[in-house]
Amino acid sequence: MLALVVVLAACSRDGRTLAPATPEQSESIAIVPTETTLSLEPSDSFVVGGPWIEGADIDLAFTCFGRNVSPPIQISGQPTGTVTLALLLHDVETPERLLWTMANIAGGTVALGEGATPPDVVVATNSDGNAGYSAPCPGTGERRQYLLTVFALDKVIDLAAVTDANGAVDAELLLTEVEMGTFDLAESTFYVQAP
């Protein structure tokens, strides 16, 4: 969860800074945390999984050492009020390394097929510079941990809000929008052992 918070927190920049207080401004205000400002913990009933045992190694077919294809995903227990889902896969040790980032998956979706991209989703350009799935690829002999998170959102992400000047969906902008609409999440971890 810490890695996810780091990734989402890194995406919460809007460039604004507060002006210094003037002499006549002597009162301060207290900001009371709301449900949206608190860290979300994964729900017990909202679950995501794939072709791996939780916390175990994934089949190399879904890595750069195999077929380089996204794994099938199962989603269950979506909370009431889910309008859309978003998905993020990243390396736990280097959370800024985004491997798979997409949003606007229809609420109620219970599975994503192997190598499939649902219709009408927003797919971000990930750390490899391409849109879509970037297979995990640790260095020779290395074993690395990956975190798959599915977010339940109460909104549809506006494509224009997350598209950069070149027409690509920017992962950082997308994650900021996801963070603002998330009210529940599900997580699963797996490892990749490089040959």
Image: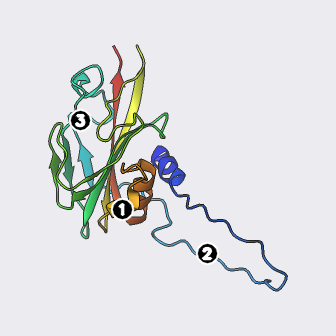
Of the numbered discs 3 and 1, the one sitting upstream in the chain is 3
Label 3 secondary element: loop
Label 1 secondary element: helix
The reply, left or right, for residue 77 in relation to residue 21 is: left
Which residue carries the number 3 mark? 70
Report the number of numbered marks. Answer: 3
Q: Amino acid at mark 3?
A: Ser
Q: Amino acid at mark 1?
A: Ala
Label 2 secondary element: loop
Quick check: marks 3 and 1 in contact, CB under 8 Å? Answer: no
Which residue carries the number 2 mark? 31
Q: CA distance from mark 1 to mark 2?
A: 31 Å
Q: Amino acid at mark 2?
A: Ile
Q: CA distance from mark 3 to mark 1?
A: 26 Å
Of the numbered discs 3 and 2, the one sitting upstream in the chain is 2
Tell me: residue 136, above or below residue 99: above
Of the numbered discs 1 and 2, the one sitting upstream in the chain is 2
Residue visible at 36% across and 24% down in the picture: 137
**Crowding at label 3, few (<14), some or many (≥20) Cα neighbours within 10 Å?**
many
Tell me: residue 161, above or below residue 66: below
Q: Nearer the viewer, residue 78 or 62?
A: 62
**Crowding at label 2, few (<14), some or many (≥20) Cα neighbours within 10 Å?**
few
The reply, left or right, for residue 145 in relation to residue 111 is: right
Report the mark closest to the observer, 1 or 2: 1
Q: Which mark is residue 160?
A: 1
